Amino acid sequence: ITTYAKAAENKGHCVIVAGDLNAKSNLWGSPNENLRGTEIAEWILKEDYTILNDGSPTFERNTQRSHLDITPVSYTHLT
């Protein structure tokens, strides 16, 4: 992802990464964290991306709620 994102940013494009990543991190509202979430959160912070998630769960079934889907965006070239 980093290679493609950098290439797009170097051409002045905004980058949107979206996915059902099964990643948990406090950064996007999950009350728990897992290794995948920690690694993705570190990448998002390092690349200076903004997360479009508002902290709401992205999965709900009965009493189960999870924050597994994330949408980080690079706004670097939008200003």
Image (cartoon, rainbow, N blue to C red):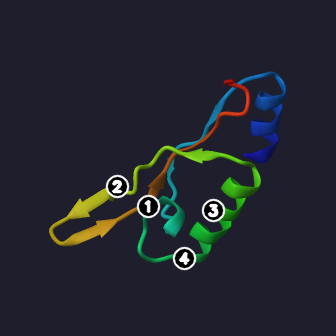
Horizontal and vertical percent for residue 22?
48, 63
Q: Which of marks 4 and 1 is nearer the N terminus?
A: 4
Above or below, comparing residue 61 to residue 2 in the picture: below
Residue type of the residue flagged with mark 3: Ala
Categorize mark 3 by other alpha carbons within 10 Å: few (<14), some (14-19), many (20+).
Answer: many
Element at label 1: loop
Query: Of residues 66 and 51, which is closer to you in this image?
Result: 51
- Mark 4 to mark 2: distance in Å? 16 Å
Q: Is mark 3 on a helix, strand or loop?
A: helix
Q: Pick whichever, 18 or 72, lies toward us.
A: 72
Q: Residue at x 67, y 54 (%)?
A: 44
Earlier in the chain: of badge 4 and badge 3, it is 4
- Find out whether the residues at labels 2 and 1 contact each other: C-beta distance under 8 Å: yes
Q: In this rendering, would 19 be left or right of 75?
A: left
- The residue labelled by disc 1 is 68
- The answer to whether the residue labelled 4 contacts the one labelled 1, judged by CB atoms less than 8 Å apart, is no
At 57% from the left and 68% from the top, the residue drawn is 37
- Which of labels 4 and 3 is toward the front? 3
The local secondary structure at tag 4 comes to loop
SS of the residue at dot 2?
Answer: loop
**Residue designated by label 3:** 41
Which residue is denoted by mark 4 in the rendering?
A: 34
Looking at the picture, tell me which residue is in the foreground, 12 or 34. Answer: 12
